[in-house]
Image: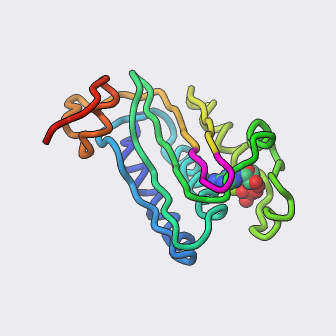
Amino acid sequence: VPVDADRLVAEVLDRTRTTAQAKQISVVAEGERGHTVYGNETQLATALANLVENAVAYSPERTIVTVRTGHRAETVLLSVIDQGIGIEPRDLDRIFERFYRADKARSRATGGTGLGLAIVKHIATNHGGRVDVASTVGIGSTFTLRLPGRPPADIAVEHNPGEIAEDIGQVEVQP
Ligand code: ATP
Ligand code: MG
């Protein structure tokens, strides 16, 4: 089933707004518009919402969480970028395991069970995609959902010319 990526992102922003507001964190959408992914909208929204909830949970107050849409060939990329505590390199491989939580003391304050990312991975895999992470302790983390998809018919719908320019291999776009 085709799922409109913009709608998916809007739904997730809506769903996570209250939790984010409690920490004065703004969750903002950026990047390309008009992409289509395939599958179960409810499950895909759950996966993306789990990533945003983590971003909020593991970030200090008054930071920004960004949900960025992009693509690489036929793959739609949904990245959740935070300015949070980051993840130690030795934990990076393990955080997608069920019940695994990095740094117990730190994590306990937020009271999770360690299932969120296992669910995200499961949903991504079931949709023919995957999820990966890049993170630097003290700087922040970026989790990216990669899903088989279809770019918009007219890529000019892009509302951030700088990013698409990178994708088609240009260095710079003059206004
Ligand atoms: P829950 O089941 O409520 O989601 P959880 O958030 O602890 O509990 P996961 O979402 O699976 O479980 O995340 C696993 C661990 O990965 C977390 O405990 C945390 O240590 C680490 N982690 C996940 N997302 C981030 C993030 N954005 N920044 C820093 N650490 C993170
Ligand atoms: Mg979680």
Q: Is residue 35 left or right of residue 85?
A: left
Which image quarter is the N terminus in? top left
In the rendered image, the vertical position of residue 148 relative to residue 123, given as above or below: above
> Residue drawn 24% across and 40% down?
161
Count of numbered marks: 0
**Scheme of colours in the image:** rainbow
Q: Which residues are magenta?
A: 136-142
Q: Is residue 149 left or right of residue 50?
A: left
> Residue drawn 52% across and 66% down?
63
The image quarter in which residue 5 lies: top left
Which image quarter is the C terminus in? top left
> Residue drawn 30% across and 43% down?
33
Outermost left residue: 175
Q: Is residue 137 magenta?
A: yes
Outermost right residue: 104
Residue 61 rendering spot, x and y as whole percentages: 58, 73
Q: Is residue 43 left or right of residue 105?
A: left
Locate ligand 2 by image quadrant. Answer: bottom right
> Residue drawn 34% across and 36% down?
35
Foreground pick, 168 / 27 = 168
Q: Is residue 123 magenta?
A: no
Residue 162 rendering spot, x and y as whole percentages: 28, 39
In the rendered image, the vertical position of residue 26 relative to residue 160, given as above or below: below
Q: Is residue 14 left or right of residue 123?
A: left
Residue 116 rendering spot, x and y as whole percentages: 70, 51
Residue 150 rendering spot, x and y as whole percentages: 36, 28
In the rendered image, the vertical position of residue 9 relative to residue 107, given as above or below: above
